[in-house]
Image (cartoon, helix red, strand yellow):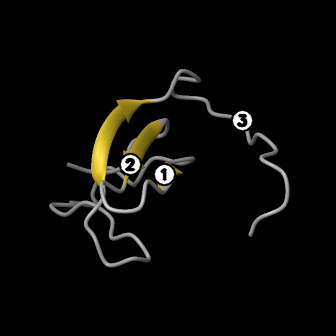
């Protein structure tokens, strides 16, 4: 499964989330989910409410 724009991955350990902002090239094969900074494999939560054309949203300052 390759990364598709709009997909959201979440960590079941610490709750961190990432959103894919750009799809992978068609020739790229991915058979692993991304790894969280805490060391846990992140799980796909499906597509975001923004769909396949996500826009950057301000979440305030990063900690």
In-image side of 32 versus 53 (left or right): left
Where residue 10 appears, as percent x and y from the top left, is 38, 50
Could you tell me which residue is drawn at 43 percent across and 54 percent down?
15
Label 2: which residue?
Answer: 9
Could you tell me which residue is drawn at 84 percent across and 51 percent down?
60
Instruction: Say what secondary structure mark 1 lies in.
Output: strand
Front one among 19 and 10: 10
Q: Are marks 3 and 1 in contact (CB under 8 Å)?
A: no
Camera-nearest label, 2 or 3 = 2
Task: Work out how far the residue at label 2 is from the one at label 3, CA to CA, in angstroms.
Answer: 17 Å
Front one among 55 and 37: 37
Q: Which mark is residue 17?
A: 1
Image quadrant of residue 8? Answer: top left
Image quadrant of residue 31? Answer: bottom left
In-image side of 10 versus 54 (left or right): left
Q: Residues within 10 Å of mark 1 (few under 14, many from 20)?
A: some
Camera-nearest label, 3 or 1 = 1
Extreme-left residue of the structure? 31
Q: Are marks 2 and 3 in contact (CB under 8 Å)?
A: no
Q: Residues within 10 Å of mark 2 (few under 14, many from 20)?
A: many
Could you tell me which residue is drawn at 33 percent across and 37 percent down?
45
Label 3: which residue?
Answer: 55
Of label 2 and label 1, which has the lower sequence position?
A: 2
């Amino acid at each position: 499964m390759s990364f598709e724009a709009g997909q959201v991955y979440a960590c079941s350990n610490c709750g961190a989330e990432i959103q894919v902002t750009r799809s992978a090239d068609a020739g790229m094969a991915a058979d692993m989910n991304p790894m969280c900074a805490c060391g846990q494999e992140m799980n796909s939560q499906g597509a975001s409410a923004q769909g396949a054309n996500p826009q950057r949203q301000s979440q305030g300052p990063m900690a």
